[in-house]
Every structure is written in structure tokens, then in C-alpha cells.
């Protein structure tokens, strides 16, 4: 049932948001002629890697821009490889808006349709983040990662490791259709509040 709802939900979302896809694609392409999408390898169910898609919110020469400012780069490293959007020179003006509103995440409906992700589930991580879960790693990887989840619903970037591990695993301990519905609406509310959005 969960997979069926993922397929139906992602198809409907891709149809409904197709005008948004078109407009954002034109805006991103028009700025610097670079790629519309950003793809990054994440770890899925059972430890299987997959490419997760987002709208590109950074300049094509993002790494060079960041490394040209040694002080800011050190702050980026010290802050667990993150910077606030307002101080990150790599993020484009349209990218800053996309991140605040979370529309940069819309291409993940393609991942959901493919079966890499679910609408609701723990947030997919890059390989190095798996170390944060220690001996609970297999439990974390026992379900499909989600575009929305308890971590996003309760603060996103405001909740860092190791607390994030506890939040994500709490979802797995209590997984049910009713819990998914509750998290879906909590996440939508969190997005509108722009809570924890980087």
C-alpha cells in the first residue's frame, strides 16, 4: 500500500508541479547556462546507493567560490560542512528562494517514482553520515528513505547529530499509515514556517 501511494502521489505531484518545473528550469538555465538539476549520491534501503535529484541552487563554480575565502571555508568545515543560506556565496538568488521554500526538493518526486525513495521516511544520507548511526545503521537502512520525514517535520537543520539519529529511528520504531499522514501534514506546516531551511 505504501509503495502504491508513493507511485500515485509522485505521479500527481509531477503533473501538478510541471509548470513550476518549467519556470524554474528556464530561470536556472538562463542565469549561467549550467545544468538545471543537481544530483548527489545518497544511500538507500539496504545500503544501496542512488542519485538523489534537486534543482540546482548553487553556481556552477561553487567550490571555487567557497575556497577563495579561507575564513569562510574554515567556518563551513567547522559547521559540519554547512553554511546559512544568507552567508553562503555559492547560492544563487533564485537558489536562495528555492531553499527557503523547499521547492528545490521537488525533483525528488522522480526518485520516489523510481522507487529510490518514499514520500515519507528517514532523510537519505551521504555515505560518511552512516557512521553517525553506529550499530544502529542496519535499522536506519531497513526502510526506504523519504522526501519528507520526522526530522523535517520537527526542525530539519535545527536538529543536528547525534539527536538527528534518534529522531529518524523514532520514525522507524513507530511506522504506520496514520503516522505517515501525521508527518506529512507536520512537514508541510514546517515548510510554510520555513523552519530549519538552509
Image (cartoon, rainbow, N blue to C red):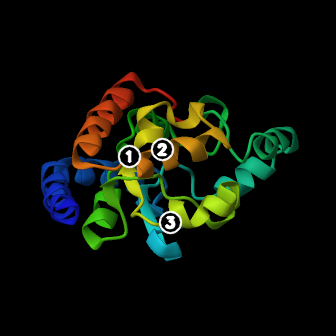
User: Within 10 angstroms of label 2, few (less than 14), some, or many (20 or more) residues?
Assistant: some
As drawn, the label of residue 141 is 3
Location of residue 3 by image quarter: bottom left
**Is 46 left, or right, of 60 in this rendering?**
left
Whether pointer 1 and pointer 2 mark residues with C-beta atoms closer than 8 Å, the reply is yes
Which residue appears at 13% of the width and 49% of the height? 16
List the residue tagged with mark 1.
174
Location of residue 80 by image quarter: top right
Is the residue 93 above or below the residue 46 in the image?
above
SS of the residue under disc 1 = loop
List the residue tagged with mark 2.
170
Which residue appears at 65% of the width and 38% of the height? 88
Q: Nearer the viewer, residue 44 or 34?
A: 44
Between marks 3 and 1, how big is the CA–CA gap? 15 Å
SS of the residue under disc 2 = helix
Whether pointer 3 and pointer 2 mark residues with C-beta atoms closer than 8 Å, the reply is no
Q: Is residue 30 visible?
A: no
Which residue appears at 43% of the width and 27% of the height? 194
* Number of numbered discs: 3
SS of the residue under disc 3 = loop
Amino acid at each position: 500500500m505504501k509503495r502504491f501511494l508513493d507511485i500515485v502521489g509522485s505521479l500527481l505531484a509531477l503533473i501538478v508541479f510541471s509548470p513550476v518545473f518549467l519556470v524554474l528550469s528556464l530561470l536556472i538555465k538562463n542565469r549561467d547556462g549550467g545544468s538545471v538539476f543537481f544530483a548527489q549520491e545518497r544511500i538507500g534501503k539496504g545500503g544501496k546507493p542512488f542519485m538523489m535529484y534537486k534543482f540546482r541552487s548553487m553556481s556552477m563554480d561553487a567550490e571555487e567560490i567557497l575556497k577563495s575565502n579561507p575564513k569562510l571555508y574554515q567556518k563551513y568545515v567547522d559547521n559540519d560542512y554547512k553554511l546559512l543560506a544568507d552567508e553562503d556565496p555559492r547560492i544563487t538568488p533564485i537558489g536562495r528562494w528555492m531553499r527557503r521554500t523547499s521547492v528545490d526538493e521537488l525533483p525528488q518526486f522522480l526518485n520516489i517514482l523510481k522507487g529510490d525513495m518514499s514520500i515519507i521516511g528517514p532523510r537519505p544520507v551521504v555515505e560518511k553520515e552512516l557512521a553517525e548511526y553506529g550499530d544502529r545503521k542496519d535499522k536506519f537502512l531497513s526502510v526506504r528513505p523519504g522526501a519528507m520525514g520526522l526530522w523535517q517535520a520537527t526542525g530539519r537543520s535545527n536538529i543536528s547529530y547525534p539527536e538527528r539519529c534518534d529522531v529518524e529511528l523514532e520514525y522507524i520504531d513507530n511506522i504506520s499509515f496514520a503516522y505517515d499522514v501525521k508527518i506529512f501534514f507536520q512537514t508541510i506546516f514546517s515548510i510554510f514556517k520555513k523552519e530549519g531551511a538552509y
